[in-house]
Image: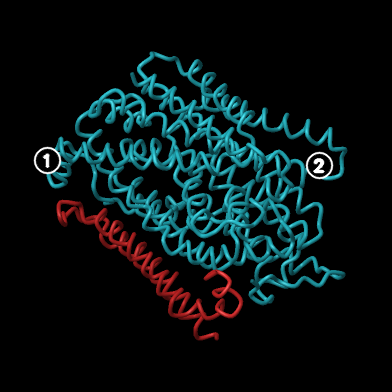
Chain colours: A cyan, B red
Amino acid sequence: MAAFVFGTIMCLSIAIALYARRGKDVLNVEQYLVGGRSFSGILFFFLAVGEIYTIGTMIGFPGGIYAKGASYGIWFVGYILLAYPVGYFLAPLLWRAGKKYGAMTSPDLFKKHYSHRGLELVVTISALIFMIPLGQLQFEGLIVALSALGFDLSPVMAVIIAGCIAFLYISVSGVKAPALVSILKDILMFLGILIAGIAVLIKMEGVSNLFTFAKQHGTSVTIDQPEVMVFVLTTILFQSLAFYVTPLSIPMIFTSRSEATIKKSQRFMPLYMFMFPFLIFTSYYALVAIPNLKNPNQSFVASVSALLPSWLVGLVAAGAALSGILVLAVSSLSIGGMVSRNLLPNVPEKLQRKSVQITVFLYLLISMGLTLLAPNLMVNIINMAYYGYGQFLPGILALLFSRKITPIGITTGLLVGDIAAISMHILHVNIYNINIGLLALILNFATTYTVSILVKNRSQNIIPIITRHVRA
Amino acid sequence: MAFRKVTSLLTGLVIPYLSVLGGIAFIGKYDTPIFGIPILYFWIFLWLPLTSLCLAISWSCFDRYEYQINQSRKDAK
């Protein structure tokens, strides 16, 4: 039954995707990549929240609480919540920059603002590299979603099936489709989370009982060790600052109709987070009722399977799988944009298209491979992806606010930040438990500033975005 | 103009940051339930609507005016 419902919903989503494409065969690049900068507040809102709440939220987040307790729950909710105020102030400026330069990808901003090919390339390549953990995250989640359907799939088999669904999806649905399909996905996801949370509350007879039981089972509802507290606070700080400069969120900002539209939508985004209490209830239920899961990522799906009838399990699994596949589709689109516009801008179109296809294929393949070779707690993968995304911050702030910072400075800073983050991650460097992305970011800022001061830029006069007037 | 921008940043950015991060730091080790929810979770749930409120105040009291001339007439249509 679960498998039947799952299959029906996947087919329905493909039908919606095909419908969305109908009559829109000829799209120019701007419509293709940033929706023609025309989205109203409501559409922008749903696109934004649709990209934010993915399989990482639905399946990864409860897994994090299951494995690590309250600290992971608080970190995850905290960084998304505080990202919204940052976005309220930062995103309109990014939009202004995008509008001024006709930018469609984040490297576009650097290319036009600084006219520096080296900087553009370094930004593009590091963006492409840090898209990989994002892909891995989706596949990790897809394996879990498929496992809910009751077939005893090996991880290899599950990844191959998930990969095939994703390939099929991207090839039929193309471009405009994800926005429309994401409405279906959001409804399914929200309903799934809500139903699961309510089922938990009914089963446990109230919130009080749930947490009292959880405490009796020795699960944590506090952050009582100072070193864990340092990790939580520095990670929230670092990731909330990095949130709006990721290679996926910048094109998302560009889809808006105006700066005011962005600001007005931002106001309501924290309210959409009211699904988190329900997810947290479900996570604690899993801790109490299903204590010995081998893979913590399974905790949400395991609770749902224990509480709900089979057809509802299928519904929830389909919502999760759809969100994973959608993110894969959107990232592939974003990768396509970066390869064709920034990596190989001056090659014949035929070769360009081939390279885009090969890059996207490789991207999916590498992500699938990593999922199998280095399975990980999903929230940890999110953490890793941010180590890289955060390093774009000095460059973005420079182009918005600074006359002094030079492209050479940004390039060097970004390289130092990326290399520092990756090596600290591989070598398991631990300095008072401070988030290593934040440490790398501090190095990055220092390098960007020092190099900009030492290597003076003679020819260019760079006017920061902030000096321009608000425009309609 | 400068006054409006600074107040807006204080309301919309500084207050939520300090409250959420400071709250977590201070409340972290207590497990007292409020309405059945452990206080740490309760605090962060409370700041979902409060953050929204801070942003709404930033917009309505300060930032709106900067955009009004060019924008609000256009959006109202």
Q: Chain of mark 2?
A: A
Residue A155 in the image, given as x and y percentages of width and height: 46, 19
Label 1 vs label 2, nearer the camera: 1
Q: Nearer the viewer, residue A5 or A467?
A: A5
Corner quadrant of residue A90: bottom right
At label 1, counting other C-alpha atoms closer than 10 Å, the crowd grade (few under 14, some 14-19, many 20 or more) is few
In 3D space, how far apart are the residues under numbered discs 1 and 2 (Cα atoms)? Answer: 60 Å
What residue is pinned by disc 2? A344
Q: Nearer the viewer, residue A236 or A14?
A: A14
Q: Secondary structure at mark 2?
A: loop
What residue is pinned by disc 1? A205
Say which quadrant the N terminus of chain A sits in. Answer: top left
Residue A63 vertical placement versus A310 (above, below): below
Residue A230 in the image, given as x and y percentages of width and height: 39, 55
At label 2, counting other C-alpha atoms closer than 10 Å, the crowd grade (few under 14, some 14-19, many 20 or more) is some
Q: Nearer the viewer, residue A177 or A328?
A: A177
Residue A388 vertical placement versus A148 (above, below): below
Q: Residue at x 65, y 40 (%)?
A: A333
Residue A367 vertical placement versus A155 (above, below): below
Tag shown at residue B44: none
Q: Nearer the viewer, residue A195 or A359?
A: A195
Is B26 left or right of A416, judged from the image as shown?
left
Q: Secondary structure at mark 1?
A: loop
The kind of residue tagged 2 is Leu
Q: Are marks 1 and 2 on the same chain?
A: yes
Residue A380 in the image, given as x and y percentages of width and height: 45, 39
Residue A218 vertical placement versus A235 (above, below): above
